[in-house]
Amino acid sequence: MRQIVLDTETTGLEVEEGHRVLEIGCVELIDRKLTHRHFHHYLNPQRDIDEGALEVHGITREFLQDKPVFADVAQPFLDFVKDAELIIHNAAFDVAFLNQELSNWDKKAGKITDYCAIIDSLEIARNRHPGQKNNLDALCKRYGVDNSQRDLHGALLDAEILADVYLLLTGGQTSLGLGQSSNQAGGTAAPQEARFERNGRSFRIIKASEEESGAHRDKLQRIQSISEVGCVWSKELPEGAG
């Protein structure tokens, strides 16, 4: 099973207003494992960038002046993603922009869905966590994915992070590897997580650190010292439990 996790950065929010893609980042999964193959390009959008978009990704028009236009990378991009499942967070946004770029390149190119199936990880997250925040940062916090490098949005880094979030969101194991560059062929895999299954769903087991366990024991001792009936949680815990 070949899947491509994709993210784009754009000059603005509305494709109908002529906004363009200025960065594409893709990482490859085969059988739910990161291969470290990727497709990544900055693109010259040949137009101004909205201030709001610039605040999000920090990519300036000056930086993009010598970069290729979408037409230069369109065929290599399609070759990379063809026949894969595209995993995109809030897919409608990126798909609309990709369809517009394909149309600008070649009216006969069709739509991205002519080449790939689309999986919207945002919809999966909303079904799993109704009523909660399900943006990428919120999911990173919920699933313990390191996004400390994400000061600004970037298509390739966000695709790498989303790949790890998607694997955890859909109940699979993942070797994060975010400290490695995406074109590395090797690297040491992260240790396998402890998990348990219940009602057909897979859950991570996150153990308290020694510092956290110590703080918990101190808290119970303080409750024990000031409570008239003692600390009931201490009575129920075995000796040395945290």
Image (tube, grey):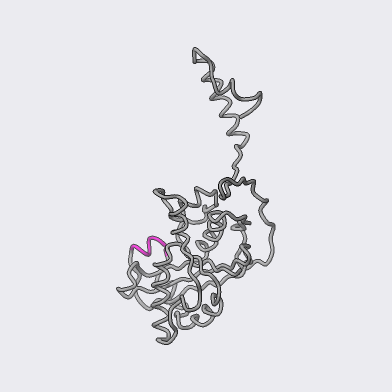
The residue sitting at 39% across, 48% down in the picture is 131
Q: Is residue 44 above or below residue 7?
A: below
Q: Position of residue 150 (x, y in %)?
A: 49, 56
For the C terminus, the image quarter is top right
What stretch of residues is rendered in magenta? 52-58
The structure residue drawn at horizontal position 67% and vertical position 67%, both measured from the top left corner, is 185
Residue 214 in the image: x percent, y percent? 60, 29
* Among the 4 quarters of the image, the one containing residue 2: bottom right
Please, is residue 220 above or below residue 136 in the view? above
Q: Which quadrant holds the N terminus?
A: bottom right
Q: Name the image quarter holding residue 59.
A: bottom left
Residue 87, compared with residue 217, is above or below; it is below
Above or below 42: residue 140: above
Is residue 35 highlighted in magenta?
no
**Residue 127 location, quadrant:** bottom left
Spot occupied by residue 20 in the image (x, y as percentages of width and height): 38, 74
Residue sitting farthest toward the front: 199
